[in-house]
């Protein structure tokens, strides 16, 4: 999978070089590129914002740097001022004009989008090319958002009902949630199957050695070696936890059997 991120704070994204995502990049499972929006400006101050038409508080991100950055990523335009070359026919982009080529998905993090979740992460993990546009200030000039919809599969996406200062942290959240689902990124794929949100239930509590710690014992059943009983115990804990903390998730599950219902009632 190829992921491009555009931001005025590219250093923010440096955390993605660590841990499993960094390893996936090293292994070539993920081609991750972070672009500085200011590389696509041409004035002395590398201006990326201006005051809003119609008045109001704050500043708005100008359309042209975004368009140039997107064209560079698509290998279409004349690129920016970065030392990376002028884009054009470099063959880097996955765009092109052929009708049978999947359009890259452009994700614009915004509290005005639908809320990101595990289903969306799964859907995005099958994409070939994701582009994240990290806006700052009051947001990005709507015209370049509309313009980008002709080139990309455009998705505004929120990570929750609160307001962040910009799209960087939201992009990192989504990139981490998506890239860990790419085959090979997580060493043991079984660890993906019993996680919170994977099947609509929250995960069960887990324990490790010692069996007794500060007068607290590991639940006995986990020491029993009875795999069937352990699986049932774990499912019961997942049901209880979900019912207590996220009854909204439970209400969406339609495959609960009699035993499951007895646990949550
Ligand atoms: N930008 C600001 N707030 C955000 C949120 N909640 N989700 C995604 N992007 C944002």
Image (cartoon, grey):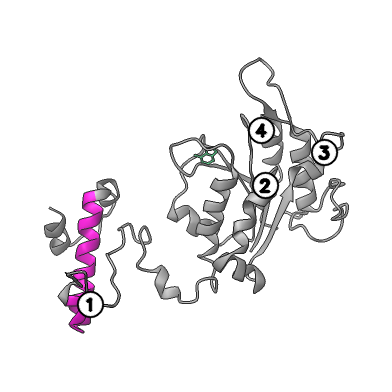
Residue ID for mark 2: 152
> What main secondary structure does the magenta stretch of the protein show?
helix
**Secondary structure found at label 1:** loop
Closer to the chain start, of discs 1 and 4, is 4
Closer to the chain start, of discs 3 and 2, is 3
Q: Residue furthest front?
A: 214
- Closer to the camera, 101 or 137? 137
Q: Residues within 10 Å of mark 1 (few under 14, many from 20)?
A: some
C-alpha gap between disc 2 and disc 1: 53 Å
Q: Quadrant of residue 220?
A: bottom left
Mark 3 or 4: the one toward you: 3
Residue ID for mark 3: 41
**Secondary structure found at label 2:** loop
- Against 141, is 68 above or below? below
C-alpha gap between disc 3 and disc 1: 60 Å
Residue drawn at x 52%, y 52% as measured from the top left:
173
Q: Residues within 10 Å of mark 3 (few under 14, many from 20)?
A: many
C-alpha gap between disc 1 and disc 4: 54 Å
Mark 3 touches mark 2? (CB < 8 Å): no
Instruction: For ligand 1, tell me if the residue under mark 3 lies within 8 Å.
Output: no
Magenta residues (range): 221-244
Closer to the chain start, of discs 3 and 1, is 3
In the image: residue 135, left or right of residue 254:
right
Residue ID for mark 1: 211
Mark 3 touches mark 4? (CB < 8 Å): no
């Amino acid at each position: 999978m190829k992921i491009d991120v555009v931001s005025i704070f590219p250093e923010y994204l440096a955390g993605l070089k660590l841990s499993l995502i960094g390893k996936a990049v090293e292994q070539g499972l993920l081609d991750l590129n972070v672009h500085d929006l200011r590389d696509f400006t041409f004035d002395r101050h590398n201006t990326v914002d201006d005051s809003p038409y119609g008045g109001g508080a704050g500043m708005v991100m100008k359309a042209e740097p975004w368009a140039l950055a997107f064209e560079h990523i698509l290998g279409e335009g004349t690129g920016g001022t970065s030392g990376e070359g002028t884009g054009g026919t470099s063959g880097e982009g996955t765009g092109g004009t052929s009708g049978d080529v999947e359009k890259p998905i452009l994700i614009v993090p915004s509290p005005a989008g639908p809320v990101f979740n595990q289903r969306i992460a799964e859907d995005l993990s099958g994409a070939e090319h994701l582009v994240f546009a990290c806006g700052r200030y009051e947001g990005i000039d709507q015209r370049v958002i509309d313009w980008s919809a002709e080139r990309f599969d455009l998705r505004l996406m929120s990570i929750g009902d609160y307001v962040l200062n910009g799209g960087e942290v939201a992009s990192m959240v989504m990139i981490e949630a998506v890239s860990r689902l790419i085959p090979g990124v997580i060493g043991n794929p079984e660890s993906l199957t019993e996680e919170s949100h994977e099947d609509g239930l929250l995960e069960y509590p887990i324990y490790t050695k010692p069996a007794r710690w500060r007068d607290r014992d590991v639940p006995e059943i986990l020491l029993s070696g009875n795999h069937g009983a352990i699986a049932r115990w774990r499912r019961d804990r997942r049901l209880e936890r979900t019912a207590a903390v996220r009854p909204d998730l439970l209400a969406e599950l339609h495959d609960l059997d009699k035993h499951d219902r007895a646990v949550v009632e």
